[in-house]
Amino acid sequence: MNTEQAPAGTPTADTPRWSKGCSIAVFVLLGLTGLGAWGLAELEKGLDGYGQLEQGGPAGSVADPLGPGATARYEDGLKVTVSRPRPEPDGTYGLTVTYDNGTDGTVRPIGDSPGTGVSEYGPAPLVVRAGRSLDDHSSGVTPSWLNSEEAAAALVPPLGPDRRRTVPVRIKPNGEGVTVTVEVAPPTASFRETAYFQLTLD
């Protein structure tokens, strides 16, 4: 009968020393790869100022606008949603623009001036104008933005992190089937891409 035992501290044949070393090396390599990918993504965001749109589907650009109810998502965490327009009994249309601040800092949705923060023609941080996104701002068909001053006043106060603000927009079209474009470009110290929404007032 063989009663020999391996001395304490001696690796057995079942778990060779090189196998443990390889496992640790693989885990370290995977960790470094993940860390490198995260760092590269953060560097890319930092180079363009975190103001780029991150969209799945329509890009939200002037050539590929978002539709009603869609949300423009920025790399820094800011989200802006434009609702579907709804007809009102008095012949006007109502929609909402919602700013959801998922950034680390305070956002001023239209800057600090209500007079220059909104427009029916552009450019401004919030534009509600007639025509398709690619149309010239001086299009002949011009719906009236009835509550632009009230919307501007509601959007001037700073919006803190993890806060949301929704403002109503009332439009009076001068015909049926009018296409309206909403342009959103919240000011920032560096760069913020303009998000375009194209809506039809049926």
Image (cartoon, rainbow, N blue to C red):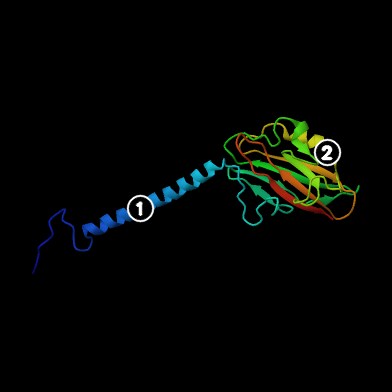
Residue 15 x, y percent position in the rendering? 23, 60
Which residue is rendered at x = 71% and y = 36% of the image?
110
In the rendered image, which quarter contains the N terminus?
bottom left
Mark 2–mark 1 CB contact (< 8 Å): no
Residue 41 x, y percent position in the rendering? 50, 47
Which residue is rendered at x = 82% and y = 45% of the image?
138
Callout 1 amino acid: Leu
Q: What element carries label 1?
A: helix
Neighbour tally class for label 2: few under 14, some 14-19, many 20 plus, Cα within 10 Å: few
In the rendered image, which quarter contains the C terminus?
bottom right
Quarter of the image where one finds residue 193: top right
Q: Which of 41 and 138 is in front in this view?
A: 138
Which of disc 1 and disc 2 is earlier in sequence? 1
Residue 21 numbered mark, or none? none
Neighbour tally class for label 1: few under 14, some 14-19, many 20 plus, Cα within 10 Å: few
Instruction: Point out the residue furthest to the bottom here.
Output: 1
Callout 2 amino acid: Asn
Q: Name the residue under label 2.
A: 147
Q: Distance between the residues labelled 2 and 1?
A: 58 Å
Q: Is mark 2 on a helix, strand or loop?
A: loop
Q: Is residue 104 left or right of residue 114?
A: left
Residue 160 x, y percent position in the rendering? 63, 34
Q: Name the residue under label 1.
A: 29
Q: How many labels does the image show?
A: 2
Quarter of the image where one finds residue 4: bottom left
Which residue is rendered at x = 60% and y = 50% of the image?
54
Quarter of the image where one finds residue 158: top right
Q: In this view, does 34 lie to the left or right of 115?
A: left
Q: Is residue 9 left or right of residue 178?
A: left
Instruction: Point out the residue furthest to the left here.
Output: 1
